Amino acid sequence: MSKPIVATASLAGCFGCHMSILDIDERILTLIDLVEFNKSPIDDIKTFSKTCDIGLIEGGCCNSENVENLRDFRKHCKILISVGECAIMGGLPALRNGIPVKDCFAEAYLNGPTVDPAGGIIPNDPELPIILDRVYPLHEIVKIDAFLPGCPPSAELIWKALTALIEGKPLELTYDLVKFD
Amino acid sequence: MSKIKFSVDGRECFGKPGQTILEAARDNGVYIPSLCRYEGLKPTGSCRICTVRVGGRYMAACTQPLSEGITVENTAPDLEDMRRAMIEMLFVGGNHMCPTCEKSGNCELQALAYRYQMLVPRFPYQFPLRTIDPTGPKLLVDHNRCIKCHRCVAMVKTKDGKSVFGPLYRSKRKKIGADLTLAAGLTDDQAKKAMDHCPVGAILKKEIGFAVPIGRRTYDKAPIGSDVETPRT
Amino acid sequence: MSTKAPLDSLLARHGKDPSGLIEILRDVQAALGSIPPEAVAKIAARLGLSRVDVEGVATFYHFFTARPAGTYAVYLNKNVVAEMKGRAEVARAFEKAAGCRFGETTADGLIGLHETSCIGMNDQEPSALINGVVFTRLTPARVRELVAGMKAGKETGKLVKKTGDGANQSRLVRAMVDNNIRKPGPVILAPFKSGAAVRKAVTWTPEDVVAEIKRSNLLGRGGAGFPTGLKWEFCGREACPPRYVVANADEGEPGTFKDRVILTELPHLLFEGMTIAGYAIGAREGILYLRAEYAYLKPRLEKVLADLRAQKLLGKAIAGKKGFAFDITIKLGAGAYVCGEESALLESAEGKRGAPRPRPPFPVQNGYLGLPTTVNNVETLCAAARILERGAGWFKTLGTPKSAGTKLLSVSGDCRKPGVYEVEFGLTINRLLEMAGGRDAQAVQVGGPSGTCVARGQFERRIGFEDLPTGGSIIVIGPQRDLFDVVRNFMDFFIEESCGWCTACRVGNTLLRQKFEKITSGKGTRQDLKEIEAWGKTIKAMSRCGLGQTSPNPILTTLLNFREKYEARVDATRDYVSTFDLEAAVRDAAAVTGQTLAEARHE
């Protein structure tokens, strides 16, 4: 049997969840035996070259590129998993939710304390992704099959979830595994 | 003293006159999850998480007086699912950014979510726009996290019995406001008590935070309620 | 402008008892047009309360405003029948003529436009309250005339051109409201001579009066149907007098207005019912809790009370009975549907936020000011007086075995003859529609938003506690209506009127409303249908009071009786549909930066 294929991405996240994947320590060697990675910052493959079994996504959607990336993952992955608080509920970037984008721009690029006193500019290069009106949890945009909470989710949770999926067994959630910080 | 006989999920229990269902169950080693209730304060029945079913009717165990011979359902799967729905509603109805919160690990709302193993709420996040208010020289109120339990309303009073906190508005606009003049007069001890009574991280004492490291906080290791529960014999 | 002098003199007119807080706030709002922070501070100091307590009450009721409500504060009813009768055009006319939007006050502070829940005029919509004066059957032309009058500085009362029928013409009322009594009946809308019931009652013992009411099988007319005799018995049995009688005249269920007609035409019957209740339970004081929307009736009600005192039907030694003293005061609300719930009403009567209390203890044990209190619906008290006059046996010949007597129905919506009908219990919807001229209805909402939406195929169902209980609201929904518009209006009503105390109602109703929107906008799945039903049931089970326990009914009863309408909107072939719209989500940012999705995609 061929190895399950895994893809990962960080959207509006901090890569902390990817760090937590790496936090499985020496089990990473076992993991590499168990699965094949496709599109992922871990192996730096930038586009999907085949259909994947499992997609792991950290970060919510804060701009148009995130949305298109997420939709691309949904198209290519049989099972799509929201990894971490930002993917599940927007996380820190979602602190701006409820505040009009215009005001966020003004604070970040025109009036904020870190803006060059000589004057700021709101980034408007046509090729930049467009900021969304708020940060969206992934499951509001595409169907998500599983959720791994935590900021980041512990390496233990990621490991147990991945191995359970690969082995086709149900994930046994013990008290220590579900934490939001 | 006379005893009141009742049962919870088929387990025979005895309680005392004047007790609520929740108190009597607790004395029998049965945990009925609750959030807004605080020992020693008059229960308000606002969170609804302690809802039990008695004779097919739903009632808040924290306010319902115990009566002779009642058969209480506490862990029926459909009831537990509705409690979980209340926890999820509280999560989506506010802005609960656990990773940024000083109360994380000691938060009773979060602890209930852990106990119920909430991975994601079934409801869409509402992201209400809320404020963070400095409340007197000692306190900070983060309305993003407030669950309107009314504990602070009942607990934080001035010497002459005036409320420092009180409910404002109605519907989903409801918020807990503070009398800033009275809040300015709170002692350090009162301010600390206000923070400790808050089940979430809505009332914070200024100048302290993240004092206990991860791993040693109240709900890091054992679920909320595990101090109450005794195994069934 | 300093508000100091008027505020001080205004406060001096009131006592220092916190139970008078709502009256004080009403006066401040009327005099200053708002309740500014300095008023909150002064009131708090005077009553010995904390400011947040006063602010809590001031922000609970929708006729109190922190910002100026306008020299002319217009409150336009937004209930569903108003919508049916052309409210949208009327609202636009107000905005255009006044020069501000709803939710705003004109720059000069002259006119404030506000929305409000049902004001009890469903039989003559669209209607509005302007500074407490009722204006019915509004049209855009009439609105322009009214706004012109306001701009000319006319007194609000002078803008009323023609008064309605009956006591609406009284010098003390002068309202353009019509009674619209379409069908009088034997119990309530019948001739009644003041004193006939109480004179008989005082020849009996209080126990015998209670026994007679119990024998009559009179059930509470507010909708819940608790046996009135039993309530009086429980209350009279409580050891610690004083006890109170409270008449619940807070008819806020959208679509009901029958108490308005009683309060206009038969206040003496109501007061007599209260007096008999007082005699039966051993109370010396009664309170009429009058919803703010009916404040225009208060001067006349006070006059009727004065007349009754003069006739020795109130006061001491009533009807010549030594030792029987009873009197009635009127307390006004300030805009909150939830105050129709009896424990919330008591909180409000005590000058507090109208949040329901935990029950038990029930009001008969722990009511007004913590004392034993019987709270009865206006119509119930009227029926009680008539039962004493005519006998329980007579009363039981009317209606059905389980629902004795008659019921006042407030019929409105898509029918030719909206108004009040006194009918015997057991009447079919079909028969009612025939009488009211609404036979082509696609649905009838029985019991208001918290009741049941009955489908055409079920019109042989009967009004009564054994089948379709109702506090009296009957809304006829014609074939031309989109039923989902009705449901949406009802859900918005509950969301607005939730007291906010408990999680299920405060948060849940909004979530339910969003799910409803997802489904009706064509973005629902079968799973969404399952969820909306489950969520509705959860809110009913987990809510603290009757509001939350019935708030999902508009959705649940239409899901039950009109399931095909929902099924038609969902995509049965898909298991997930997102409501996310990328074009819409980037609109705000693109407006600032000038970016386009095509360019951002590097197309």
Image (cartoon, coloured by chain):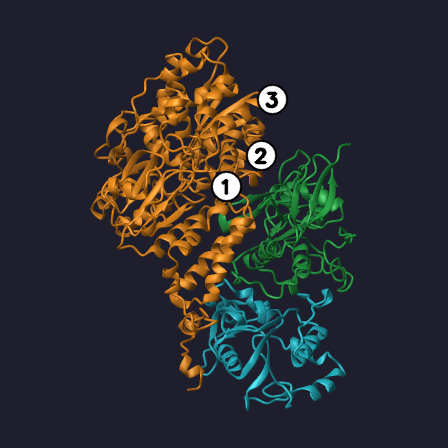
The amino acid marked with disc number 3 is: Cys
Q: Which chain is tinted cyan?
A: A
Q: Which chain is tinted green?
A: B
The amino acid marked with disc number 2 is: Leu
Secondary element under disc 3, as helix, strand or loop, is loop
Q: Chain of mark 3?
A: C
Q: Position of residue B130 (x, y in %)?
A: 54, 56
Q: Is residue B56 left or right of residue C473?
A: right
Q: Is residue B107 left or right of residue C326?
A: right
**Mark before the other along the chain sequence, 3 or 1:** 1
Q: Position of residue C439 (x, y in %)?
A: 25, 47
Q: Residue at x 53, y 45 (%)?
A: B168
**Mark before the other along the chain sequence, 2 or 1:** 1
Q: Colour of chain C?
A: orange
Above or below for A36 versus A112: below
Residue for badge 1: C37
